[in-house]
Image (cartoon, grey):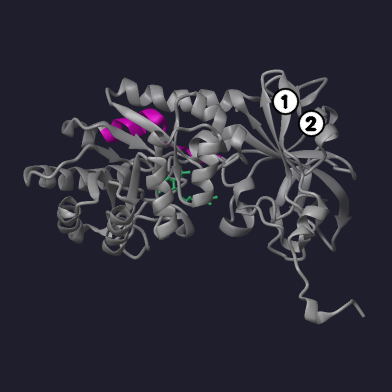
Amino acid sequence: RPHLRAHVLDGLVMDDVPLVNIAREAGTPTWVYSAATLRRRHAALRDALREAGLAASIHFAAKANDSLAVLRVLGDEGAGADVVSEGELRAARAAGIPASRIVFSGVGKSAREIALALEEGILQINAESAEEVERIAEVAAATGREAPVTLRINPDVDARTHAKISTGLAENKFGIAYGDAAALYARMASLPGIRPTGLAVHIGSQITEGMAAYRAAYARVADLARALLARGLPIERLDCGGGLGIPYRDEIAPTPAALAGAIRATLGPLGLPVMLEPGRWIAGPAGVLLASVVLQKRGQNRRFVVLDAAMNDLVRPAMYEAWHGILPLAPDALHAPLAPADVVGPVCETGDTFARGRALPDLPPGALVAFLDAGAYGATMSSTYNARPLAAEVLVDGHRWAVTRPRQSHEALLANQVVPDWLGAAA
Ligand code: LLP
């Protein structure tokens, strides 16, 4: 984690900014992202693809982090976006990412979303079913536009990741069954409003178990692409999805070079441009979640560290049994003796547990901690459960930092609600 370092005087530092300064001024819980790390990781992926001799474009998966500041940093580096909703499409455009670099993925796009994508002049829509292809054709006809459509296939391979984030098995809801794909692609070519642009695949997220699943999925795409080309059907490019895992704890994660090698070995011979839709690999290690200790509580035989952050902020531990590193921010805490603690939030659920038996120093009320690798699927998955306002977001860029989304106010939390007239005045 080159952007994070322990400094004897300042405690934990991101880029050039001590995180305690940010916590003091912006309060907690607060998400903090490193612009330098975002740039460096985007460049590392781009370089790995280039060194493998691939003509490749990177489309950041906005679901991992849809902060406008983060999207702007990546867009300025030349990244496109992979979006799955009208909201994400609007966020990417608002951050200045041109529509010509945006892919629209997802298993259930509404007619309204398709129309907006076409109106914006989007690079491509990834269709996942025959029903969706027909819907896109209808919207295209109604709006007089041509829809660039890539077909996402379900390769039926096991990415060997957590069941909740595995997407490439036949039993998963994603993609078109492999056996049905060729006929549907031909159908796409026959529809006047549709320009078939290629094939896509995405087998899952947080893939760490080597490259075998990737290679198997890409090989199926390559076979299908060859068959389609042999039939005279046009293919402009191939979309390799996202999924590259990161080491949250001690996992051995595959490198960008390994992924690029797998793509070259399977899809390279086709000589077509390829696309990647990474989210976690770029943004995960670029962000932390800062939290304060509310109190330390002694259970019957456990120590509980109760934070002001909770599962409504960072849901990954509760939802996927995910492990996130937790580091104290203060300089003295970095060298203090360690003892096991359960780190929990104040939400009224046992699942609101970030870590069990974690080795941590004494953390008195007010002590600050950072959750590591929280830049992907952190803030984007937050909710206001227990009427807890959404946390603030901060971007660090060298020695500068700014609040990029202020903490939601309690007024804002209640602002849009209506008590119907017929209920009368409060008793
Ligand atoms: N492309 C498509 C079509 C996707 O569905 C996804 C993620 C990505 C790209 C980006 O995948 P990545 O490179 O980030 O692995 N909330 C879960 C992860 C859900 C991923 C959903 N799809 C988590 O916190 O682990």
Q: Amino acid at mark 2?
A: Ile
Residue 12 place in picture, x, y as percent: 75, 28
Residue 256 place in picture, x, y as percent: 40, 30
Whether pointer 1 and pointer 2 mark residues with C-beta atoms closer than 8 Å, the reply is yes
Q: Is residue 360 left or right of residue 230?
A: right
Dot placed on the residue nearer the N-terminal end, 1 or 2? 2
Q: Looking at the image, which is closer to me, 259 or 198? A: 198
Q: Is residue 243 left or right of residue 336?
A: left
Q: Residue at x 76, y 63 (%)?
A: 386
Asked if residue 96 shows in the view, the reply is: yes
Per the image, the residue denoted by label 1 is 401
Q: Is residue 370 left or right of residue 177?
A: right
Q: Looking at the image, which is closer to me, 133 or 71? A: 133
Instruction: Give residue 278's quadrant in the image.
Output: top left
Alpha carbons under labels 1 and 2: distance apart: 8 Å
Residue 22's disc is 2
Q: Amino acid at mark 1?
A: Trp
Observer-side mark, 1 or 2, equals 1
The magenta segment is 250-263
